Amino acid sequence: MASRARLFKEYKEVQRDRGQDSDIQLLCDETNIYRWTALIKGPTDTPYQEGVFQLAINVPEQYPLVPPQVRFVTKIFHPNVHFKTGEICLDILKTAWSPAWTLQSVCRAVIALLAHPEADSPLNCDCGNLLRSGDNRGYQSMALMYTRLAAVASVPNSSA
Amino acid sequence: MSREEASADVERGITPSDTTSQRSEDVIVQFAAAAQPEMMRAAEKDEHYVGQVCEACYDAFRHTFGTRLAVAYQNEMKLAGRVLYYLLTTGSGLQTLGEEYCDIVQVAGVPGLPATPARRTLLVFYQTVLPYLAERLSSRAAAQGMALGAEDEPNDMDIVSQISSEEESADREASGSERLASSNLRRNALEVNSRSRMSLTGGLRQAWMTALRRWAMILPSVREALMLFVRTHLMLFYFEGIYYHMGKRAAGIRYIFTGRPTQQRPRYHMLGLFLFIQLSFVCGDWLTRTVFPSIASSMRSRAAYSSVSPADSRGIAVIDEDGGKLDDKGTNRQSSRWADAEAPGSSKCPLCLSARQHPTATPCGHVFCWNCVAEWCNEKPECPLCRAPVTHPELVCVYHADF
Ligand SMILES: [Zn+2]
Ligand SMILES: [Zn+2]
């Protein structure tokens, strides 16, 4: 499977469906089709709902046989996202990858992860511990604070 | 043959003074220079074992100090593993595992004497510590420079993180040989470093600031230049076949082949030629870019990592795989395409997202291109859509079926 051809197809679909899925904005690097940026809206009824988060997507040459590397660029307080590096712990990006996933659906999966934090496989131990000890209020307020600090400021920029 | 024996053999064989003085009737054994395939195979093997040592270091560190610290000191652990491996092999005068596997031995200079300890230490330093230091210094300088630039515009804060993370990913991508090749970067980094000392003592703080800011600006192009440099070095290796690693070139350590001479070993001149062609194209491209100022300015804006805005994506002209120019006009055909994607009789393969070539069904009833699904089954024997187990013999090509 030629990764380039497939990425062009995905690019076309993204261009075609632009505006249909307002929660996800996928942008391809102007000069390198293996580099993408995604802007995702935090899901409603979560502490992330006011924020827009930037993801950096690095697509390997063997794509779609291997998953793309996805990272949060915007700081986020979430048990399955490394606070410093933005690394994401999500099974479909590692062992459970299937080539039927597209960059668009991967972004959708990341949004779903925001809505359903998994405290048992934490990359952010502080956050995981809050959830595991049942301190949901502590988790919510921390996540909300970091959303407001890091992800809300960029809203006017991205909605332009 | 054990490694000690092998190296003892070699020393006996290639030290002319030894053999000639004691047994002058013996013919001096001259070993041939190692061929390219052996050197590359040895390097690959070594990278593999270095990876294992690094992993072991990381695991040990993680068990002792916990995951959090281990993640923080990931790069240092990699460095430790690398240093350990090369100190225990090259550093102590033995062959590395890869070299032993390929029957090649390090020698220094033209007479072919074994490398002196000083030379070997230098090599280990070039191969391990230097790339790490260069990377570290330059990324720190760049991060500081970006932070300085951001003081004027506080909105640019996330660009800083973008830059530094960009570096991390570049770091991860860099293969062993590329990392070895950062001598250029090292020189620049050292220059920045020495500049820092000078400015701190001389009170030229302003100059230091501008230097930092400049460094952050030019870092992407420096990286690009470095990649070109690595390519050029590889091309030289393909042509002359002496130094596969830049560290070995710098330390003047080459290889001889001590195994049983076999049939004609292949040379890689053709590869070198192709690389040369590619490099000249890149250079030509670069020249035209600098000649046309408008394109050059767009390049510069890319280098400065202007934050991505949705408006940017609108201006992109993309050539699709058929060679046609793809732009917003594509939306004209939107309705019809949308229809055929949604239609139940869709003949689209969910893996390559194009029309199915040689439709092939899995036992679970999902249909893909033959190539797409067969390639995936090499990776993982399950259906990409429903994860039902699939093996190659179970794939059925479905021709003459209208669906
Ligand atoms: Zn296909
Ligand atoms: Zn299936």
Image (cartoon, coloured by chain):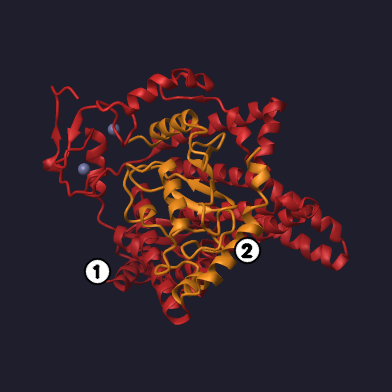
Q: Nearer the viewer, residue B74 or A18?
A: A18
Question: What residue is pinned by disc 2?
Answer: A145
Q: Residue at x 46, y 74 (%)?
A: B67
Mark 1 is on which residue type? Met
The furthest residue to the bottom: B64
Rendered location of residue A61, percent (x, y): 40, 42
Q: Are marks 2 and 1 on the same chain?
A: no
Query: Which quarter of the rendering shows the N terminus of chain B?
Result: bottom left
Q: Is residue A136 visible?
A: yes
Quadrant of res B8: bottom left
| Image hue for chain B | red
Relative horizontal placement of residue A28, taking residue A68 as reference (left or right): right
Q: Indicate the position of residue B309 as horizontal and vertical percent values.
A: 63, 38
User: What residue lies at 48% left-to-right and 46% top-to-bottom?
Assistant: A58
Residue for point 53% across, 22% down: B328
Image-based side of B229 in relation to B234, left or right: right
Mark 2 surroundings within 10 Å by alpha-carbon count, few (fewer than 14), some (14 through 19), many (20 or more) = some
Per the rendering, the mark at residue B1 is 1
Local secondary structure at mark 2: helix
Q: Is residue A160 left or right of residue B345?
A: right
